[in-house]
Amino acid sequence: MLNLAGIVADSIVDGPGIRVTIFSQGCPHHCEGCHNPETWAFEGGTEMSEEQLVEIVRSNPLAKGVTFSGGEPFAQAEGFAALAKQLKSLGYEVASYSGYTFEELQNGTDAQKELLEQLDVLIDGRFELQSRSLELVFRGSRNQRILDVPASLRAGVAVEQSAPRWHGKY
């Protein structure tokens, strides 16, 4: 079961194309200027099973990708890893936002590493108000990176996502 703050069934701002965005409830980072401070508390939210979430995703025939946001998805890494695995088996591209960096997640818990291994794309790093930019695509501050997770895991270092669609070019 995952504790969620909400779901947007047809997002166009959390990655390229039409995506389903799943917002986790609970975040340890509490970044100044956070876009979703209502997701900080770990209590509250709505519990949903991975199976329920897969059905919600599948109910939108236009969605080709799913994005985990928050809150902090890696605070519920075990459940999000199981969900990501199911979604990938159905052919969805899976991305996640995280206040943790790729490097922190590489040294994280086993569940965090498992979730990382299930992702196609990671937008990493805490939101930094002093680095905020409205010109960025799919990011809030200049320190955040859009990473190609499979390439990063193979290389053992963060590898920027090079697909033009992840940079607003179609």
Image: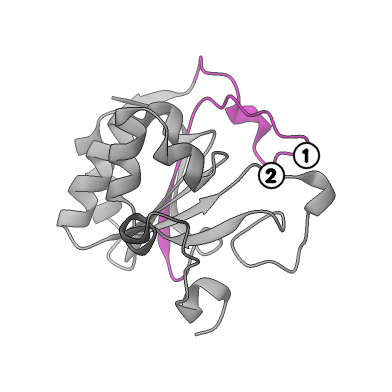
Residue 30, image x, y percentages: 68, 28
Q: Quadrant of the N terminus?
A: top left
**Image coords of residue 39 (percent x, y):** 58, 29
Inspect the image, locate mark 1, and give the three-letter code of the amino acid beneath it.
Gly
Residue 36: name its quadrant: top right
Residue marked by disc 1: 33
Tell me the residue at 63%/58% (across/down).
139
> Answer yes or no: do the residues labelled 2 and 1 have beta carbons within 8 Å?
yes
Residue bearing the label numbered 2: 127
Q: The residue under label 2 is which amino acid type?
A: Phe
Quadrant of residue 2 in the image? top left
Q: Where is residue 143 in the image (x, y as percent from the top left)?
A: 69, 54
Highlighted range, magenta: 16-44
For residue 16, side relative to residue 47 (left or right): right
Q: Which residue is drawn at 15% across and 55% down?
A: 89
Q: Using the image as rendered, state which of residue 91 and residue 75 is in the foreground.
A: 75
